[in-house]
Image (tube, rainbow, N blue to C red):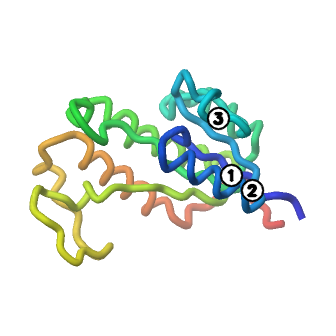
Amino acid sequence: MSMERVAVVGGAGFVGQHLSVGLSSKGYEILVIDNCADCPTILKGFEYRRANITDEVAMKKAMSEFKPTVIIHLASMGMSGSSMLSPMCKTVNVHGTSKLIDMCVELCIPNLIYTSSYNVIYGGKPIINGTESLPYFPIDQHTDQYGPTKAMAEQLVLKANGRKLKNYNTF
């Protein structure tokens, strides 16, 4: 039986680094994809490709060469500070996620794990005893770009669940 291959997109951040270490210790082969310049120094011991999730050519090349069975999608734009207001949030969070979903279908990558954010339900008031059954905060009432674009991306992933892969053969 071959080793599971996991691509961690946005893997240079705090969560991505720790997740990669944990998965590697369990025997998974890891490819970290991120767009940071100093990632090779941070991510010693892991295969690394520098790419932005919006760069379809670079992402497709990395996935085609590594051939993961799982993609863990941690990449996002605008989690804090002034970047929360950037129109680039939609490009990265929504369009990047959409392209990643299409890539999974085209390259027959059967598993995509998406990391969302509490910002999809947060509207400025405390959330007490919240569960995943809480409704999305209305898209047009967000005061930033991050929350609504993470909600849109999450909805794309949920809608794609069960989507048939091209030329997929079970092993």
User: Residue at position x 40%, y 41% from top?
Assistant: 76
Q: Select label 3 or label 2 by which is in front.
A: 2
Q: Quadrant of the C terminus?
A: bottom right
Q: Position of residue 156 (x, y in %)?
A: 41, 54
- Secondary structure beneath dot 2 equals loop
Tags 3 and 2 in contact by the CB under 8 Å rule?
no
Q: Is residue 1 left or right of residue 64?
A: right
Q: Position of residue 170 (x, y in %)?
A: 79, 66
Q: Select label 1 or label 3 by which is in front.
A: 1
- Secondary structure beneath dot 3 equals helix
| Residue at numbered disc 1 | 6
Tags 2 and 1 in contact by the CB under 8 Å rule?
yes
Structural crowding at the residue carrying mark 3, measured as other residues with C-alpha within 10 Å and reported as few (<14), some (14–19) or many (≥20): some
Q: Earlier in the sequence, mark 2 or mark 1?
A: 1
User: Residue at position x 43%, y 63% from top?
Assistant: 158
| Residue at numbered disc 3 | 60
Q: Earlier in the sequence, mark 3 or mark 2?
A: 2
Tell me which amino acid carries mark 1. Val
Q: Position of residue 73 (x, y in %)?
A: 52, 49
Label for residue 111? none
Structural crowding at the residue carrying mark 2, measured as other residues with C-alpha within 10 Å and reported as few (<14), some (14–19) or many (≥20): some
Tell me which amino acid carries mark 3. Lys
User: Residue at position x 17%, y 68% from top?
Assistant: 127
Q: Position of residue 44 (x, y in %)?
A: 69, 35
